Image: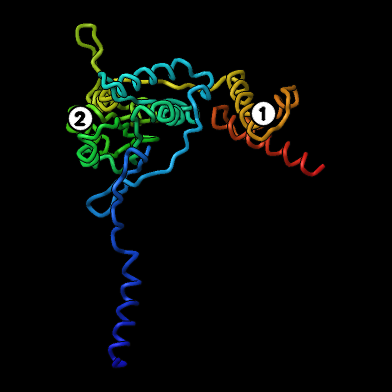
């Protein structure tokens, strides 16, 4: 073969090798019989659903001390899975108190009944109509899950979400529902200045337009579920549960005592919070430490 042709082919292959990482990934056709969850990925002006491998080891019984919240969302999800009327849900409150874990546990509970979970980032919420279009007509039931949903002062994106909820999900097929978590009840910062234009009319308080505009966003969610910071007793109950789970899985014999309780309290104090995430992390630390010490004996 002519050396010039060989040189051309080698150069062309080099160019293709550099360009290939820049080309859009080929969308995967999801088999919803096998895939339990997916994540929406933005690419250029479009996007696609990428299947996720999820673990179903988190159960509703693992969520300690949030019985009311668990029961509320469980009922709403059971209605949805059975094809009955159900509401979009906003889970708001203190960080690390089980908001996201509750949604993952519900997937484990209802996956066998056709429930599926789709994660979508806040910045991609404008793509909701495209996602809904792809899910329409499927026999599975889909929860669109947006974790840590909030908007900063001056951002106008929350108005996009309002229009998206009204324009796509309120009249979406009945196999699609939106669950979101947030540290803020109204998803956007609330300032004292927002109330400066509030006024009294015939003895009735009328909020300013700024307040009304911000509250209107969370009003799109028919179900509000509140999560609160843990008391010390609540925190220790959660620690006790996760130590039991972790120790059982590792075959570790243990007992609750004052030293373990004080260690858990010191752990929480050092991190500046008492919540379920902190309790789970302490349990992993303590059980791992016990296993390490016994292995070195």
User: Can residue 196 be seen from the camera position used here?
Assistant: no
Residue at image position (73%, 36%) is 290
Q: Quadrant of the C terminus?
A: top right
Q: Position of residue 194 (x, y in %)?
A: 30, 26
Quadrant of res 258: top right
Furthest residue to the bottom?
A: 2
What whole-number distance in Å separates the C-alpha atoms at marks 2 and 1?
Answer: 47 Å
Per the image, the residue denoted by label 2 is: 173
Which of the pair 33/95 is nearer the observer? 33
Q: Secondary structure at mark 1?
A: helix
Per the image, the residue denoted by label 1 is: 264
Q: Earlier in the sequence, mark 2 or mark 1?
A: 2
Residue at image position (30%, 50%) is 28
Residue at image position (78%, 39%) is 294
Which of the pair 221/144 is nearer the observer? 144
How crowded pointer 2 is (Cα within 10 Å; few <14, some 14-19, many 20+) is rated as some
Q: Is residue 199 left or right of residue 260?
A: left
Q: Position of residue 61 (x, y in %)?
A: 51, 22
């Amino acid at each position: 073969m002519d050396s010039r042709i060989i040189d051309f082919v080698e150069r062309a292959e080099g160019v293709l090798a550099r360009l290939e990482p820049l080309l859009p990934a080929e969308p995967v056709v999801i088999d919803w019989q096998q895939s339990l969850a997916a994540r929406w990925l933005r690419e250029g002006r479009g996007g696609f659903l990428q299947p996720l491998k999820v673990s179903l080891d988190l159960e509703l019984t693992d969520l300690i001390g949030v019985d009311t919240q668990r029961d509320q969302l469980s009922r709403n999800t059971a209605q949805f899975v059975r094809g009955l009327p159900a509401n979009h849900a906003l889970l708001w409150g203190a960080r690390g108190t089980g908001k996201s874990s509750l949604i993952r546990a519900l997937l484990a509970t209802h996956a066998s009944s056709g429930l599926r979970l789709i994660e979508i980032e806040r910045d991609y919420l404008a793509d909701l109509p495209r996602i809904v279009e792809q899910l329409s007509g499927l026999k599975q039931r889909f929860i669109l899950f947006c974790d840590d949903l909030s908007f900063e002062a001056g951002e106008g994106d929350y108005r996009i979400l309002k229009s998206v909820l009204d324009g796509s999900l309120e009249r979406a097929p009945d196999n699609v529902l939106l669950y979101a978590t947030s540290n803020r009840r109204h998803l956007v910062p609330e300032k004292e200045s927002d109330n400066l234009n509030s006024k009294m009319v015939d003895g009735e308080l009328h909020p300013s337009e700024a307040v009304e505009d911000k509250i209107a966003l969370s009003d799109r969610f028919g179900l509000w579920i509140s999560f609160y910071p843990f008391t010390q007793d609540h925190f220790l109950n959660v620690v006790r549960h996760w130590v039991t789970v972790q120790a059982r899985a590792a075959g570790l014999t243990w007992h609750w005592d004052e030293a373990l309780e004080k260690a858990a309290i010191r752990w929480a104090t050092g991190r500046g919070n008492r919540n379920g995430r902190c309790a789970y992390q302490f349990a992993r630390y303590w059980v791992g430490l016990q296993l390490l010490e016994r292995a070195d004996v």
